[in-house]
């Protein structure tokens, strides 16, 4: 008797296609890649049709299958570098080259308050170099009192051509130092964001290989249609990618040839890192979630075939929710006054000064509510929000709805 398939023997792998209706070839070893997961619920679904004939027997005589589609989602714990391709596809842009200042000898480092500080240059421009508010950067080359700035990840919370205001992510103070050292500032890893033009359309072939019963299910023409990021007050950060696809094929051997191992970056917990709202660290947010929705659709059937021709992208939307301790009027009045805010969230995998991380930046959000609970504990406001495209012509913010940076993006 054949054994029953078990989840621990199931393997999830994927590979980008060159175009729709072009299933990714099995290819050479390592051309596909295993994906990290908590669950993958992809499955084939079909429309069904039941006869409406009225017969003398007073019974239903026929039932047929119709249009096929792939549906489900892939969920996992958010990890450094773990989901670069899905995030690129959801945001419709590949990761971009990382900006760098090049070697500078005219930069002064100064402490402002706590872990915040400034790096001031006497010539050139951080903006021209390509840096933006919300970027996580790394400085090198500092000597003597400036040594604490070396290889120490910092989040940009303010920016002009000559002054970069940062907060050190692990809370250690900036090392003050006069100009003279040959120093360099560089973006850590790479970032992607929803672009204003040149958006990509990606399709993937995804395989479930049930190794314990030698069964393969290959899902074709799949689209990562969104991403749901959940940040509980205590626990691992999680991500879920809803998937739409056009068809499935089966086999008794693994389709992809020895996929590459999945990324090995550390898993991120909600409490490790920093959350900055309107340029200030927010220490009273007890939970957060972000939903990126691509609003994809399929025709639902065309004459002469039971497989749709394509999956069509819609307008990309970003919504979310904060739960905030009710300390004062600040968050409540952002809702009351329809005040826009910016959000930068950096999640780290360790407590080191140069900890691996993933960050999410929304340059412009509006709150849509502020309801409060009641009970014998600290009161909490629940504040849903919608992220919007930043279109004010700012040169210090990305003109986008959301950006994602990861120290392991390559």
Image (spheres, grey):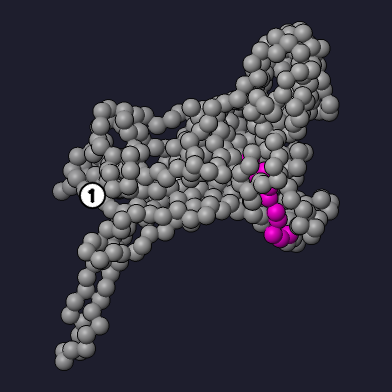
Query: What residue do we see at 72% from left, 20% from top?
Result: 124
Q: In the image, is residue 264 above or below residue 249?
A: above
Question: In the rendered image, which quarter is residue 129 located in?
Answer: top right
Query: What residue do we see at 65% from left, 19% from top?
Result: 101
Mark 1 burial class by Cα count in 10 Å: few <14, some 14-19, many 20+: few
Residue 343 vs residue 7: left or right? Answer: right
**Residue 159 colored magenta?**
no
Question: In the rendered image, which quarter is residue 67 located in?
Answer: bottom left
Part of the protein shown in magenta:
361-370
Query: What residue do we see at 37% from left, 44% from top?
Result: 203
SS state under label 1: strand
- Pinpoint residue 158: horizontal percent, then vertical percent: 75, 33
Residue 215 vs residue 126: left or right? Answer: left
- Pinpoint residue 297: horizontal percent, then vertical percent: 42, 59
Query: What residue do we see at 48% from left, 36% from top?
Result: 94
- Pinpoint residue 177: horizontal percent, then vertical percent: 80, 13
Q: In the image, is residue 139 above or below residue 143?
A: below
State whether the magenta stretch is mostly helix, strand or loop: strand
Residue 20 vs residue 51: left or right? Answer: right
Between 77 and 22, which is closer to the camera in this rendering?
22
Q: In the image, is residue 329 above or below residue 48?
A: above
- Pinpoint residue 302: horizontal percent, then vertical percent: 28, 64
Is residue 256 at least partly visible in the picture?
A: yes
Give the residue number, with chain letter if any, for mark 1: 249
Residue 122 vs residue 98: left or right? Answer: right
């Amino acid at each position: 008797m054949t054994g029953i398939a078990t989840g621990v023997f199931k393997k999830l792998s994927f590979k980008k296609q060159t175009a729709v209706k072009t299933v990714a070839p099995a290819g050479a070893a390592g051309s596909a890649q295993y994906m990290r997961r908590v669950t993958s619920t992809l499955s084939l679904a079909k429309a069904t049709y039941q006869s409406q004939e009225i017969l003398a027997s007073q019974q239903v005589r026929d039932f047929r299958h119709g249009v096929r589609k792939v549906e489900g989602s892939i969920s996992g714990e958010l990890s450094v570098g773990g989901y670069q391709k899905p995030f690129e596809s959801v945001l419709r842009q590949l990761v971009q080259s990382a900006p760098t200042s090049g070697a500078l000898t005219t930069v002064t480092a100064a402490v402002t308050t706590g872990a915040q500080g400034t790096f001031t240059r006497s010539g050139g421009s951080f903006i021209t170099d390509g840096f933006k508010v919300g970027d996580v950067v790394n400085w090198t080359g500092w000597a003597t009192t400036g040594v604490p700035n070396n290889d120490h990840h910092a989040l940009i919370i303010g920016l002009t051509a000559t002054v970069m205001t940062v907060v050190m992510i692990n809370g250690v103070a900036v090392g003050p130092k006069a100009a003279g050292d040959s120093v360099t500032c560089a973006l850590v890893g790479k970032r992607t964001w929803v672009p204003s033009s040149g958006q990509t359309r990606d399709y993937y072939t995804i395989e479930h290989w049930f190794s314990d019963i030698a069964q393969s299910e290959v899902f074709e023409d799949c689209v990562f249609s969104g991403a749901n990021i959940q940040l509980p007050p205590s626990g691992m950060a999680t991500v879920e990618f809803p998937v739409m696809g056009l068809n499935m094929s089966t086999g008794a051997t693994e389709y992809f040839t020895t996929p590459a191992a999945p990324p090995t970056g550390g898993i991120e917990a909600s409490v490790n890192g920093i959350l900055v709202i309107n340029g200030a660290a927010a220490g009273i947010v007890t939970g957060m979630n972000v939903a990126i929705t691509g609003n994809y659709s399929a025709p639902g059937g065309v004459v002469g075939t039971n497989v749709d021709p394509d999956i069509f992208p819609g307008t990309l939307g970003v919504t979310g929710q904060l739960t905030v301790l009710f300390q004062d009027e600040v968050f409540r009045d952002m809702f009351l006054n329809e005040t826009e805010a910016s959000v930068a969230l950096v999640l780290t995998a360790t407590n080191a000064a140069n900890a691996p991380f993933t960050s999410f930046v929304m340059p412009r959000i509006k709150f849509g509510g502020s309801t409060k609970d009641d009970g014998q504990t600290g009161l909490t406001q629940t504040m849903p929000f919608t992220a919007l495209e930043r279109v004010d012509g700012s040169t210090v913010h990305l003109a986008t709805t959301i950006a994602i940076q990861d120290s392991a993006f390559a």
